Image (cartoon, rainbow, N blue to C red):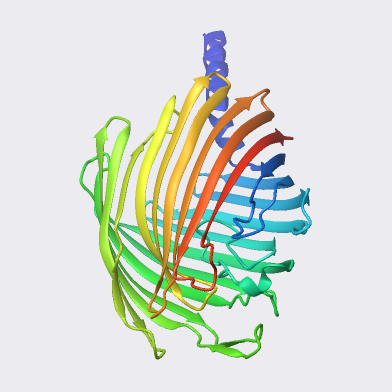
Amino acid sequence: MRKMNRKRLAGASVLMASMAAPSALAQKWETSAELFLRAQQSDNPRLELTGAEDTLASIQTVRLGLDRDTRTLTLDLDLEAEFVQFSQSDILDDEQNQRGSLDIRYQSSPRTTYKLYTRYGHDSYSLRQAFEPDVIDPDLPAPDPVLADSLSQTRIDRWIALPSVEIAVGKRSQLELAAEHRAASFEEGNPFFLIDYESTQYTGQWKYALSSEGYDAIAVRLGYTDYTSDDAVDNRGDQPRFVAGLDATGIPLVITYRQAISENLYIEAKAGAVHLEFDEDGRDNETESLLGLRLATQDNTKRTTYSVTYAEHIQPSSGSSLVKTRDFSIVYDYKWTRKSRLGFTASAYQNEQIGLAQAVETDYYFVGPYYDWEATRNLKFRFDYQFRRIERDGVSLIANNSADENAFAIGVTYKFW
């Protein structure tokens, strides 16, 4: 009898240990490190209006990660250093970029969860003319023919902080209170006349689950936003030009409805508006729509995943103005074999300045198919092609207001641990 009890006790101990092992492991700190190498051949890497030339870019990126996952705390820290070298080009300087992000989620009680997300980027851009360094980036310099034959580089510091708290109210209702601060600063005396700016938004959102599973839901969000930038003087031309700073407020109201339409497909619709008031002369108060629609798969582990999205946003820019962005995108990914995937991304974006008598409208187009191959558990390859096009309306000083890019690239990612 004693032997039987000992066997049962030993069996129970093994079972409890096996059940506790994943929990104990999950509570440990975990680190990761990987190296990403990419070679990209492009005929216009900066979407320049005139004088574009073929350029080979070599990109080396080191990524470090730190994670912690416990019953009440989830923490994710990511750091990245990027080095970009250009060859076959006399107009682009090498670049060094550093980025980092921190994502924390803490559940203090079954009904209350605190969140904090923050991201920082220290980037450099070398350009022959002050033109867009990246697609749908609000920190875009406007094209300037004065700089068309000169090489310049500037540094940009950008960061975002987003603290929030979620409080369960009843069985199906949830209240979320959040604040969001965004800021961008540019190298003093930068040749592109980019103006520092910042914005702060406070929002409250009530969310109600329409089903017991909690996925079908309706939400109402109300907020208050303050946009600011300082006055500046542009000394690049023969005569100094004064540019009034941005001093505006916005009150957004958005209603969101989400519903699962099949086992692995959902639809989400947003409808709302934001009322904008400007304190400066020459800028008219406006009310802009905030619409959105998304159709996407719910489980990203399936063999086929895709999404179709349309969204509208209001954001500040480095030109001392607000910009309304309308973006439409299609993302498709297919698991071809056990170790390879095929996919593509297609998107169209439109940036339009708000509150200015002579507003500039910019359209972007992007198509990018890719092929991923997992050679080993730690070694992955990516082969891709991208086509980009930009069209700008409202710039009368430049004869050519559009530009294209074709680029082919090979990327290698090695995960050390």
Residue 100 visible, this orientation: yes
Q: Quadrant of residue 27?
A: top right
Q: Which quadrant of the figure contains the C terminus?
A: top right
Task: Tell me the residue at 71%/67% (across/down).
Answer: 149
**In this orientation, which residue lies closer to the viewer: 393 or 269?**
393
* 320 horizontally vs 411: left or right: left
Q: Looking at this rendering, what residue extends furthest in the front direction?
A: 399
* 41 horizontally vs 218: left or right: right
Residue 17: x percent and y percent? 57, 26
* 234 horizontally vs 285: left or right: right
> 327 above or below 415?
below
Residue 327: x percent and y percent? 40, 54
**In this orientation, which residue lies closer to the viewer: 186 or 17?**
186
Task: Tell me the residue at 58%/78% (across/down).
Answer: 195
> 290 above or below 83?
below
- Disc count in the image? 0
Task: Tell me the residue at 57%/9% (across/down).
Answer: 3
* 67 horizontally vs 206: left or right: right
Residue 52: x percent and y percent? 66, 54
Residue 243: x percent and y percent? 53, 86
Residue 171 visible, this orientation: no
